[in-house]
Amino acid sequence: MQMETPIEKKIIDDAIRDFKIQDFSKATIREVKSIAAFAERESGVEFIKMEMGIPGLPAAKVGVEAQIKALQDGIARTYPDIQGLPELKRQASRFVKAFIGIDISADGCIPVCGSMQGTFASFLTCSQADPQKDTVLFIDPGFPVQKMQLQVMGVKYETFDVYDYRGDKLKGKIETYLAKGNICAVVYSNPNNPSWVCLNEEELRGIGELATQYDVIVMEDLAYFAMDFRKPLSTPFEPPYQATVARYTDNYILLISGSKAFSYAGERIGVTCISDKLYSRRYDALAQRYEGLPFGQVFSTRMLYALSSGTSHSAQFAMAAMLKAAVEGTYDFRKEVGVYGERARRLKDIFCKHGFYIVYDKDLDEPVADGFYFTIGYPHMTSGQLAHELMYYGVSAICLITTGSRQEGLRVCTSFIADHQYKLLEERMKIFETNNPV
């Protein structure tokens, strides 16, 4: 016997129709968010919102205090240096050494308006470096807005789903693309948004070796820095370190964000770290177009200058203070964000208890880590069917297809889960299971 759903089905169906969404599996994060907000207002029933990847923790206090002091000292009247605040560049170099275990000079550590701007400027620079290499390769699933960036600038891209290509298979799969000679950059996030799989050192070694062999630049998105909670990655200058391709090639760009690790998303601050060799390398095409400048200076004095003329001056003081405190051991950022792992564990238990399964469930031979995101599926339901059906139960999430995944299922974000919502979710998923017997 069917039980009544927490949200009247007509409210959801009418909202989807009014938003003119023909295929709910392709609904964007913003569309899902808007429909959930509308249904919540219309029904008066609280939604459990899992679609938005927004930090659910207070911003790091050390950063807030440093930014306030900078503003009080009058920094707002001064344009920021296009290369970045010297103190931030120095602390970023130290941070990379302390938590990744590699050396990058301060020159190559360039502040950006969040990793979003860092990837945009990196795409611009990489795609113009060699006329023969006009295509970006994504190891999916991934952050959908990065593909939108390429769409905006008219750059081609190719993708494949890492689901079936872990371990030794990964290097061979990537080489089938690089061997064509048209790939300028390889992009992935580690830990991965949305699957939370973490490429290991051997997989990264393979990527690095291919990057050197085929002269391709690797863009390593570290938005969820050191959030593989299976490993003790929080002690500066001591292994284990954050896994990275930078140990295996000089052709790399690391994208470090203040948004998740330091919960500083609102100020749009990050640091793009370009290897010393790549920073100083001169590409003929870039030199002809940009007055003989090397890669790193094209990135900063041309791309970033054209985009925003630098990065918020006061936010750079905040980022510098947060990195410094992390390196000196006075601020344990990993401890602060560890709550995401606990939330994921509890949420997975509830979903799996009621017939759901974890889509990306393994990192080779061990269970995937608990973290900011995880993925769920339900037997005999497509991504779109599951996302639509869950809306009737006041649960919102995005479909994996929008992230480049070829798997049926949804991305779940743990950031906005409140303590009282575990009980709500348990009650609603019990009804869901009753109404959708396997």
Image (tube, rainbow, N blue to C red):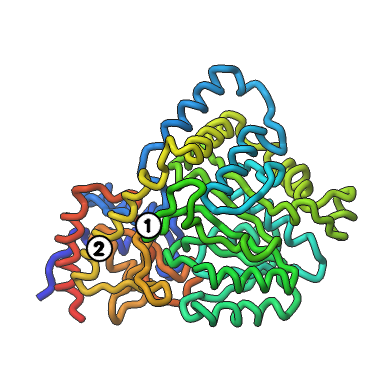
- Give the quadrant of the C terminus: bottom left
Image side of residue 424 versus residue 293, left or right: left
Q: Residue at x 59, y 81 (%)?
A: 173
User: Counting other residues with Cα less than 10 Å from the Cα at mark 2, is it few (<14), some (14-19), or many (20 or more)?
Assistant: many
Q: Earlier in the sequence, mark 1 or mark 2?
A: 1
Seen from the viewer's position, the closer of residues 248 and 401 is: 248
Q: Residue at x 9, y 76 (%)?
A: 1
Most extreme residue toward the left is 1
Seen from the viewer's position, the closer of residues 280 and 76 is: 280
Classify mark 1: helix, strand or loop: loop
Where residue 227 appears, as percent x and y from the top left, is 42, 55
Where residue 292 appears, as percent x and y from the top left, is 89, 50
User: Counting other residues with Cα less than 10 Å from the Cα at mark 1, is it few (<14), some (14-19), or many (20 or more)?
Assistant: some
Where residue 337 appears, as percent x and y from the top left, is 37, 47
Image side of residue 175 versus residue 244, left or right: right
Query: Residue 137, located in which quarter of the rendered image?
Result: bottom right
Depth-wise, is mark 1 or mark 2 nearer the camera?
1
Query: Residue 123, located in which quarter of the rendered image?
Result: bottom right
- Residue type indicated by callout 2: Tyr
Task: Give above or below for 387 relative to 259.
Answer: below
Residue 2 visible, this angle: yes
In space, the residues marked 1 and 2 are separated at their CA atoms by: 33 Å
Q: Which residue is mark 1?
A: 229
Most extreme residue toward the top is 73
Q: Residue at x 44, y 63 (%)?
A: 194
Q: Which mark is residue 392?
A: 2
Image side of residue 121 versus residue 388, left or right: right
Classify mark 2: helix, strand or loop: loop
